[in-house]
Image (tube, rainbow, N blue to C red):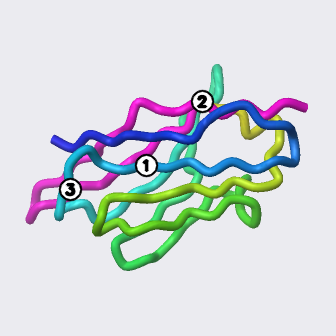
């Protein structure tokens, strides 16, 4: 079982910045990718950014150029640097980890951290 712990959410003015952190409660060597997703009220959960254990990154279209995911997947610790925040970035941000062991795969989620961007 993998437990993900997020931190760093809060209230910020539009145009401001925030950094989110995510780490596992116990190191797992079988996590091959981690990332961030978000869900606004009444909307589906959407991709924000992911990073693999090889350092490959992907971003959702709405955050490209403003958000940066970085960290060390092998150490199960990642961050999300969010800049030029907009009110539409307001959501609960969830950390995700992809766990693989031979043919066994599983997805783990954190409890989420609220990000609110005031206009």
Please name the residue shown 85% across and 37% down the image. 13
Circle number at residue 51: none
Q: In this figure, which residue is indicated by the disc labeled 2?
A: 114
Q: Nearer the viewer, residue 64 or 29?
A: 29
- Relative side of 82 to 94, left or right: right
**Residue 65 position by quadrant:** bottom right
Q: In this figure, which residue is indicated by the disc labeled 3?
A: 27
Q: Quadrant of the C terminus?
A: top right
- Relative side of 14 to 75, left or right: right
Q: Nearer the viewer, residue 83 or 52?
A: 83
Please report whichever mark, 3 or 2, sits nearer to the chain's N-terminal start: 3
- Relative side of 46 to 75, left or right: right
Residue farthest bottom in this picture: 54
Main SS of the magenta segment?
strand
Q: Nearer the viewer, residue 117 or 100?
A: 117
Locate residue 105, reporting x and y percent: 18, 53
**Residue 61 position by quadrant:** bottom right
Range shown magenta: 92-119
> How many neighbours does mark 2 have within 10 angstroms: few (below 14), some (14-19), or many (20 or more)?
many
Please name the residue shown 37% across and 79% down the image. 54
Please report whichever mark, 2 or 1, sits nearer to the chain's N-terminal start: 1
Q: In this figure, which residue is indicated by the disc labeled 1?
A: 22
> How many neighbours does mark 1 have within 10 angstroms: few (below 14), some (14-19), or many (20 or more)?
many
Please report whichever mark, 1 or 3, sits nearer to the chain's N-terminal start: 1
Q: Quadrant of the N terminus?
A: top left
Please name the residue shown 38% across and 37% down the image. 110
Residue farthest top in this picture: 42
Locate residue 116, reporting x and y percent: 72, 30
| Residue 44 seen in render | no
Magenta-colored stretch includes residue 34: no
What is the number of callouts on the image? 3
Locate residue 36, reporting x and y percent: 50, 49
């Amino acid at each position: 079982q993998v437990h993900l712990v997020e931190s760093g959410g809060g209230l910020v003015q539009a145009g401001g910045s925030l950094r989110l952190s995510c780490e596992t409660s116990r190191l797992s060597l079988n996590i091959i990718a981690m990332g961030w997703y978000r869900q606004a009220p009444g909307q589906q959960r959407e991709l924000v950014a992911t990073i693999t254990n090889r350092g490959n990154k992907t971003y959702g279209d709405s955050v490209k150029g403003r958000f940066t995911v970085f960290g060390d997947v092998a150490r199960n610790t990642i961050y999300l640097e969010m800049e030029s925040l907009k009110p539409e970035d307001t959501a609960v941000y969830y950390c995700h980890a992809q766990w693989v062991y031979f043919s066994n795969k599983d997805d783990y989620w954190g409890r989420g951290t609220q990000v609110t961007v005031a206009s």
